[in-house]
Amino acid sequence: MPDQADAQPANRFERRRAQTRGALIAAAQQILAEQGTSEASIQQIAERADVGFGSFYNHFQTKAELFEAAVVGALEEYGKLIDSITGDVDDPAEVFAVSVRLTFRLADTHPELTRVLRYGGLPYIHADFGLGPRALRDIEKGNASGRFRVDNPLVALSAVGGSLLGLLQLKSSDKSDKSGQAGPGADEQMAELILRMLGLTPEEAHEVARRPLPVGAS
């Protein structure tokens, strides 16, 4: 479920608690983004968050609990970003295409978020928060409208989620070694492949994957 910090604090004490919790989660996200691991000590996390060491245990019992909250928060942030950009798009196929293309561009526009997703995204594909339920929702909408032809939406979700995380890894590799593995138009190519997997004809997938992105996507 989404992090409890999303609830509005009722008073000053609760607001301060929420701020401290948020600072700890943000620090954990920064560490994941920079190091790709959760090996930092609690003392290092507290220093990064600019809170007292003892404050950690007012919010989390273990480091693992904190880093899970960090990944959950990143997934929700990404899901809400995609929802806000595709909210006015009626075609489920176009929603998927936009989501894929934006995922590819996240490596440039939101590098910290991208690294957190690469670190912890795979185990959460079928979670009830973040990316999974949104993708499943759009697959089912596409099926209901006849736009997609998917026998098992959960299997399709696994394929889509793995493809998107693989795309993030490809983008990261391309940036680091300049090998040209992901050149211009790679986002559209990946979107086209996913749309074909979901049941669009090659011609339909090619056209939808190359539509102009919605306002606010760049």
Image: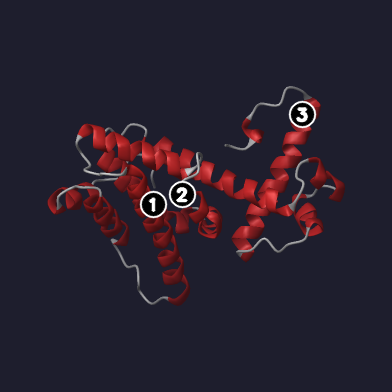
Q: Of the residues under marks 2 and 3, which one precedes in the sequence?
A: 3
SS at circle 2: loop
Kindly identify the residue that appears in the image at 34 percent across and 49 percent down: 155
Residue 178 horizontal/vertical position (percent): 41, 75
Q: Nearer the viewer, residue 53 or 84?
A: 53
Mark 1 surroundings within 10 Å by alpha-carbon count, few (fewer than 14), some (14 through 19), many (20 or more): some
| CB under 8 Å between discs 2 and 3 | no
Amino acid residing under circle 1:
Ser
SS at circle 1: helix
Q: Of the residues under marks 2 and 1, which one precedes in the sequence?
A: 2
* Relative vertical location of residue 68 with respect to residue 19 in this rendering, above or below: below
Give the residue pinned by disc 1.
158
* Relative vertical location of residue 7 with respect to residue 177 in this rendering, above or below: above
Task: Tell me how far mark 2 sits from mark 3, CA to CA.
Answer: 32 Å
Amino acid residing under circle 3:
Glu
Task: Tell me how far mark 1 sits from mark 3, CA to CA.
Answer: 39 Å
Amino acid residing under circle 2:
Ile
> Depth-wise, is mark 1 or mark 3 nearer the camera?
1
Question: In the rendering, which numbered label is found on residue 125?
Answer: 2
Residue 107 horizontal/vertical position (percent): 46, 58
> Depth-wise, is mark 2 or mark 3 nearer the camera?
2
Residue 20's quadrant in the figure? top right
SS at circle 3: helix
The image shows a total of numbered marks equal to 3
Residue 138's quadrant in the figure? top left
Mark 3 surroundings within 10 Å by alpha-carbon count, few (fewer than 14), some (14 through 19), many (20 or more): few
Q: In the image, 198: left or right of 82? A: left
| CB under 8 Å between discs 2 and 1 | yes
Give the residue pinned by disc 3.
14
Q: Nearer the viewer, residue 213 or 104?
A: 104
